[in-house]
Image (tube, rainbow, N blue to C red):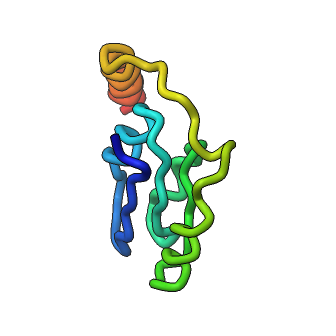
Amino acid sequence: QARAFVTASLYEGFCLPILEARSCGCPVIASNSTAIKELGAPGVLLVEPNIAAFAEAFKNFVAPDFVEPSNRLWKDVALETQSILLQANQVQ
């Protein structure tokens, strides 16, 4: 049981582990200098890519409304992901 998923990447395309963490109800702290900010996912705290910002985020991210309870099953996540990928394939 993770308290948070943290990624401090400076150069990230699409970070699938963030979606995996969120699907389990795990809060995320991530750098706002990457494509991650385009996800717009609830429960993702975006911070400046520096040590001070991440340190402050660690202190403040444990807010009652930041963590959502997990009631999703991996099967549901897989089906949702499959649906999105199939739709994206049709657009091309």
- Tell me: residue 18, above or below residue 92: below
Report the residue at 47% width, 35% height from top.
Answer: 25
Q: Residue 80, percent across and down?
A: 40, 20
| Residue at 48% from the left image edge and 19% from the top image edge | 71
* Residue 91 on image: x %, y %: 42, 29
| Residue at figure coordinates x 57%, y 42% from the top left | 67
Looking at the image, which is closer to me, 1 or 71?
1
Q: Is residue 64 above or below residue 62?
A: above
Position of residue 81 measured from the top left corner of the image (x, y, whole percent): 36, 25
Q: Is residue 31 left or right of residue 90?
A: right
Total tally of numbered discs in the picture: 0
The answer to whether residue 16 is above or below residue 54 is above
Name above or below for residue 55 compared with residue 66: below
Quadrant where the C terminus lies? top left
**Residue 30 on image: x %, y %:** 46, 63
- Please tell me which residue lies in front, 19 or 67: 67
